[in-house]
Amino acid sequence: MYNNSKNGFTLIELLVVISIIGTLSTIAMTSLNGARAKARDAVRISDAEQIVIALEIYRNTYGHYPYNTDNDNSGWDLGYSGGKDSGDVFIKPLVDAGLFSATPGDPTNTALLGGYYYYRYPAGYWGRCDPALGAVYILHITFETQNKEPIFSCPAGTNGTDTWSGTTLRAWGEFEG
């Protein structure tokens, strides 16, 4: 006699298993992409802290923050303007003074997301600060994930805080005056 039972899976069983695997892999990739974004943001935070330390060392050595020497964007110096291998140096006076062994820049390798921005404002910028306080710099860094708490606080003497959004960091230096 002939036995009709076969060992194996039905088409329905295979489709169910494939759809479960597909769903799990989608969830895993979403989590992985989020973890990668958080890791890049951790690099940005570390870079910001190193840049601020270098700026303060420069100020203590030369008596002022570096002037705006690179006009990538209306006087703002952009990190990696033109890409990481473009040769564009971020805050060139810090590099020339030997305060950076490698030029810091956004880990996404581009300024398209906002990247890193540096600008030295003269005394009394935009009428917000008392000119007697002297010049101050602003370091602006864009994050991929929400970062609701600024890492650095606005220095005394300004009229309130000045933040752009929950995904940006603005660091102020001490006033030069």
Image (cartoon, rainbow, N blue to C red):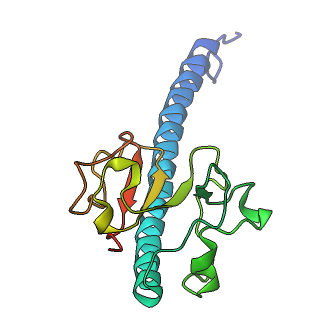
Q: Percent from the top left, x then y, of residue 54? A: 46, 79
* Residue sitting at the far right: 86
The residue that appears at 31% across and 49% down in the rendered structure is 128
The residue closer to the viewer here, 61 or 37, is 61
Depicted 72 relative to depicted 7: above or below = below
Q: Percent from the top left, x then y, of residue 143? A: 46, 48
Q: Percent from the top left, x then y, of residue 73? A: 64, 49
The residue that appears at 51% across and 59% down in the rendered structure is 119
Residue 103 in view, yes or no: no
Quarter holding the C terminus is bottom left
Depicted 88 relative to depicted 75: above or below = below
The residue that appears at 54% across and 84% down in the rendered structure is 99
Quarter holding the N terminus is top right
Q: Quadrant of residue 113?
A: top right
Depicted 62 relative to depicted 4: above or below = below
The residue closer to the viewer here, 146 or 71, is 71
Instruction: Give the total of numbered labels.
Output: 0
Depicted 164 relative to depicted 55: above or below = above
* Residue sitting at the far front: 132
The residue closer to the viewer here, 6 or 147, is 147
Residue 165 in view, yes or no: yes
The residue that appears at 62% across and 80% down in the rendered structure is 95
Q: Percent from the top left, x then y, of residue 137? A: 43, 64
Q: Quadrant of residue 83?
A: bottom right
The residue closer to the viewer here, 22 or 76, is 76
